[in-house]
Amino acid sequence: MKTTLLYAGIAGYGFNSLSRGMEAGWISHGLASISAAAKAEGFEIDLIDLRALQSWEHFREEFKARDPDVVGITMMSVDYNPVMKALQIMKEVKPEVITVVGGPHVTLALNDALRMPNVDYLVLHEGEITFTRLLHAIQAGRPPKQKVLRGITPDLDQIPFADRDLFLNEWRKWGYNLDSPEVPFVKELPPPFVTIIAGRGCAYKCSFCKPGEDLIFGKRVRRRSVENVIEELKVLREKYNFASFMFHDDCLTEDREWVIEFCRRYKEEGFNQPFFCQSRADIIVRHEDMVALMADAGLAGYFIGFESGNQRVLNFLRKGTTVEKNLQAAKICRKYDLAIWANYMLGIPTETKEEVMDTVRMIREIDPDYFSPSFFTPHPGTDLYDYVMEHNLSLITDYDQYRRNPTEPKIKGQDYEFLKWARDYSQKRKFKNRVRRAFKAFWEKYTDPHRYIRKLRRLLGLDRPQTPNRPQAGRPQWQATG
């Protein structure tokens, strides 16, 4: 029995978009994890990634050539339209193909997913165990009679490491020629670059995210052991000789003891590759000693959800932090020379123009290295989505509009021409910050000795492991090779 996994994330850049940054150059950890789990059970798995193809006709031809018995698809809300089109084409080409759809939208908007035609099974929550069991049942000629299958929560230390080659090998067939398993996106993280997930879930209660994440992963954070993560990094070092990486976790730093142990083991194993992770302003302020420890271990930057520069709006979002902590966290990052990727929103329900300008002023004061503004977008499964629907505020008329891009109206009651101006003005650096950045860039380019030391180490091969790292005793072999 042959199974094909389908990645349909083309709502942003469309077909033929490989290598165009994060959205079109990173793997889907969900599919990569499901692939690893199914392959560990002996199933034949391949991938069709719409980002690598040229058109829907190209997809039709490729699907016909693969001729799978089962197709597994992951879907966020923004992927609804391409998933619907792909399902239609697959059933036209091969009516008997068994289609299985999972991902966030299925769990968060089940009634909507049940209305989708051409779907044989819907998998809720996490899919590694349930999808593999479904394949066994289909292969044995005993497919489940029910359409909706509840995902079984896996022990994250027991499932295989993500199957990155599922994506990399497929991409290379269509012209991907970067010397990196995933596309680098900031100068602080040079290629070869990879992404990794250390845990699932989030301990916080932001109204633009919860309870959706709890519905998918459960109400508590489940994190892999430090040893399990270190073991995967060893495999990635041996396989790809990665030069940098990024944690995908919603908030890696909420578990202080885990972070401290990770930093210790990371250095003990000879890693010095820089990395990014997500954190929160209040955590950075409360645990500056942990920030210093992470910087010493290799942390190069934080993603921080500042969201708003107005305290009333922060409270409305249930962010659990303050404007003062936002500003203080930025100062701490500067102290330890950590890059700041600033996430913030404009056009939040009930937000006034003056409150928007509070955010603009805060962001210009923070002076982040990377700006990531968005227009608030009401996503299904969140409390703010319910608020928007209850107050008849939604301007979403098509699933493609669930992108967080700050380019189009999302809700009623906001002046989007003003918001576009505010978006642009928030990214204009103050004169003092332009001068500071120019001086820093000059120093890094011409005088910083660490730059030359890093280059010399790479030339001498000192950053490579001297001997192959063997799997930990008692660990299944697929975890060391997955």
Image (tube, rainbow, N blue to C red):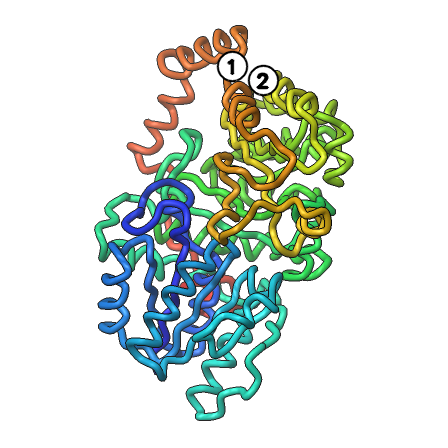
In the displayed structure, 331 sits above or below 35; it is: above
338, 144: nearer the viewer: 144
- Classify residue 278 as left or right of residue 92: right
- Classify residue 365 as left or right of residue 230: right
Where is residue 159 shown, x and y percent of the image? 53, 67
Instruction: Name the residue located 61 percent from the left edge and 67 percent from the top edge.
Output: 155
Query: Which residue is disc 1 drawn over?
Result: 429
466, 407: nearer the viewer: 407
In the displayed structure, 232 sits above or below 482; it is: above
The label shown at residue 364 is 2
277, 30: nearer the viewer: 30
- Classify residue 445 as left or right of residue 255: left
Which image quarter is the N terminus in? bottom left
Q: Say whether marks 1 and 2 touch (CB < 8 Å).
A: yes
Tag 1's secondary structure? Answer: loop
Q: Quadrant of residue 228?
A: bottom right
Characterize the local packing of mark 2: few (<14), some (14-19) or many (20 or more) Cα atoms within 10 angstroms: some
Sequence-wise, the earlier of marks 1 and 2 is 2
Instruction: Name the residue located 70 percent from the left edge and 31 percent from the top edge.
Output: 351
Instruction: Name the residue located 47 percent from the left edge and 37 percent from the top edge.
Output: 272
Where is residue 383 shown, x and y percent of the image? 71, 50
Which image quarter is the C terminus in? bottom left
